[in-house]
Amino acid sequence: MTAATAIRVAVRRRPRLATWAAASWLALLSLLALGAGLLPLVAPDAPVGGPNLPPFAAFPEVLGTDGIGRSVLSRLVYGARISLAVSLGATLLAAVAGGLLGVLAAYLRGVAESAIGVLLDAILAFPPLLLLLALAAVVRPGVGTLVVSLGLLFVPPFARLAKAAALSRLSREYFVAAQALGAGHGRLLFRELLPGCVAPVASYAVVTAAMMIMMEGALSFLGVGIPPPAPSWGAMIAAGKDFLAVAPQLVLVPCAAMFLTVLAFNTAGERLRAWAGEVS
């Protein structure tokens, strides 16, 4: 094998290795989050030892304890459950609502398209952080509040993406043929237009899930996300910053978990985007 051939093989293999690594991390994180209650972990809000114990100082607390003696490992795993629940729930809400609105705007056109456009522009007119802070002040913070508020913020991008995908399919042969054969509105919408929008919306949804994790972490860091004592990666970083000089792992561990998760979602999203471009 020549050097040029070896380089081409390595370039082709690198995206596959990155994709498999991202999928493996997301699968492991999902299993830990779903099975947290079955694992031999202490309660995330229960003190298990002295404060700020370093990693591997005591078994099974391999990641040490936080400033009030709670297990960092337990809080990290249970925090993954909260972060994934908020991220995936908000992404699903935004993808479904935005996708339906975009397809309806492309299909109905006229007054309906203008009304949907005004609604999306009204959502985009609010500064995201200000809107989230206002919702947190009015409604009790929690997983449900974050899912709804973050999901609503991302409805416009999904709607515009779905609308563009639907418009590109209005002139396709299968859609024109279905119209000519007298297909009803339901069939045209849900059998002809909507399936063609799934691939681009799904690829964007994976990337959006990464942004949702960062936004949930930022809100929890600011104290307007998941209320204590529920574990959250952003809240762990906020609590650990006061001990950064003596126990830097309290910040580094949740930051590393968030970084790897966001990187994995972005890597998987890029792969899905390439696949969506091939099938469209």
Image (cartoon, helix red, strand yellow):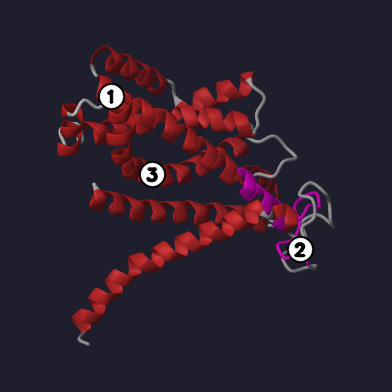
> Please, what secondary structure does the residue beneath circle 2 have?
loop
Q: Is residue 109 left or right of residue 80?
A: left
Q: Is residue 44 left or right of residue 122?
A: right
Q: Nearer the viewer, mark 2 or mark 1?
A: 1
Q: Is residue 252 visible?
A: no
Task: Give percent across and percent down for residue 223.
Answer: 64, 34
Tell me the residue at 56%/20% (across/down). Answer: 134
Residue type, numbered disc 3:
Ala
Task: Give percent across and percent down for residue 232.
Answer: 65, 44
Task: Give percent across and percent down for residue 157.
Answer: 36, 32
Q: Nearer the viewer, mark 3 or mark 1?
A: 1
Q: Residues within 10 Å of mark 1 (few under 14, many from 20)?
A: few
Q: Which residue is mark 3?
A: 202
Q: Is residue 113 left or right of residue 215?
A: left
Tell me the residue at 69%/34% (across/down). Answer: 227
- The span picked out in magenta is 60-82
Residue type, numbered disc 1:
Gly
Q: Is residue 178 magenta?
A: no
Q: Which mark is residue 184?
A: 1
Q: Residue placed farthest to the top in the image?
A: 111
Which quadrant of the figure has residue 229? top right
Q: Are marks 3 and 1 in contact (CB under 8 Å)?
A: no
C-alpha distance separating marks 2 and 3 = 38 Å
Q: Is residue 196 visible?
A: yes
Q: Which residue is mark 2?
A: 61
Vertical relation: 280 (above or below) 186: below
